[in-house]
Image (cartoon, rainbow, N blue to C red):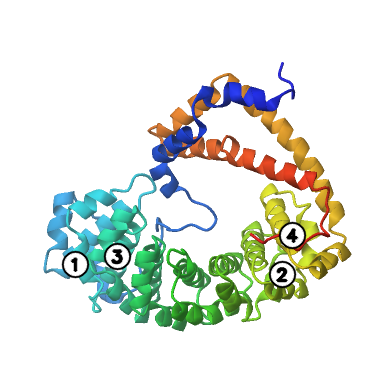
Amino acid sequence: MLTLDAPEERRRKFKYRGKDVSLRRQQRMAVSLELRKAKKDEQTLKRRNITSFCPDTPSEKPAKGVAVSLTLGEIIKGVNSSDPVLCFQATQTARKMLSQEKNPPLRLVIEAGLIPRMVEFLKSSLYPCLQFEAAWALTNIASGTSEQTRAVVEGGAIRPLIELLSSSNVAVCEQAVWALGNIAGDGPEFRDNVITSNAIPHLLALISPTLPITFLRNITWTLSNLCRNKNPYPCDTAVKQILPALLHLLQHQDSEVLSDACWALSYLTDGSNKRIGQVVDTGVLPRLVVLMTSSELNVLTPSLRTVGNIVTGTDEQTQMAIDAGMLNVLPQLLQHNKPSIQKEAAWALSNVAAGPCHHIQQLLAYDILPPLVALLKNAAEKWSEKENLCLLIEELGGIDRIEALQLHENRQIGQSALNIIEKHFGEEEDENQTLLSQVIDQDYEFIDCECLAKK
């Protein structure tokens, strides 16, 4: 029977069966590189359009409602035809292949050389349904790997997609927004390609009170991808263009719109004091604090993250967050049923406590110490229980078996195995325990605060 005696000794005995921890971690990272790219969460980098609808265009009626089943060779022939009906049928068939839920043939379509022709179809203003099918197909190709997204970009798709943002056909326009969001979400290079092609003014011009909610969600998500990544950050011009729109979108009632707008602000505040200042100066803090009280986790998480980022800034920026009421909300979040929220709230508080003495006095005035001490006490107990169980699993060779499942032919099983390893057997637990010990050892002596630094 396992006990809590000498946990460090037991860890040395069983942890990864004597293998070097850093080497084992590198091996996991190498094995799971593609799995990581496929990892989806509430705020996904890319989205594949699996189901949608075709715009109502009377001129296309002869081609609609006809079930067409084509081989790849017939698709290639149809796409290269001069007959718009054949082009439509072939493009639609290709799009359906790319929209299947499991294992869409993205690489096959790229290697067949279909992208340049689909890009041409984006310019076919006389045939909105053809534009729509081409945009949808390109959206799904761009939802793949960086190499597959690059094929869409190098095929010349960005500028025609931006031109479609002015289309009178709502479905065509929305699909173009979706495609641009996938391209921007790939990384800073393609994000900046979209920005320098002047996409932002066209995207902002689409926002209106009468816009369908699904369309507004796509626009907000695309704007958030244009704020993402910091090596390099998006340019100041782009940030200044987007910030007023984000402030407007934060007044919406839809949780998906609010979530993506908050994530966008979290990306923009994850940096220098100057960048934090750009966001704070919009006057957004009071609204963010209100959103920190949301019962919707997808709204609470990014709003709390954004405020947490802001209090890593200057003392003046931290004071603005305090004035906006953050200390009214954080004690409740320390008692949240989600550990991730507790962790974010504690992190935000630690940065307030790392400020000048008058910040600490304000923190004490809100009676934050009791819930914080209770959290520290309980989290030490929970960590010990988890450590005990993890040691037992390692002792029985469970980690090796779970890691082997990362290479399972079923992608979902591989992803689940990766999630288990990262969540329960990564080095982060050791780091968290060290941090917890340091906090406890300090005996809550916050008064000698000048030497503390925000991080």
Q: Is residue 128 visible?
A: no
Give left or right: position of 195 versus 212: left
Q: Quadrant of residue 397?
A: top right
Identify the residue position indicated by label 2 in the image: 289
Q: Nearer the viewer, mark 1 or mark 3?
A: 3
The crowd level at tag 3 (other Cα within 10 Å; few <14, some 14-19, many 20+) is: many
In the rendered structure, which disc, 2 or 1, sits on the residue that comes first in sequence?
1
What residue type is disc 3 on? Answer: Glu
Q: Nearer the viewer, mark 2 or mark 1?
A: 2
Residue 444 in the image: state x and y as whole percent: 83, 51
Identify the residue position indicated by label 1 in the image: 85
Q: Quadrant of the C terminus?
A: bottom right
**Residue 430 to residue 135: above or below:** above
Q: Quadrant of the N terminus?
A: top right
Q: Measure the alpha-carbon separation of dots 2 and 4.
A: 14 Å
Q: Measure the alpha-carbon separation of dots 1 and 3.
A: 12 Å
Identify the residue position indicated by label 3 in the image: 133
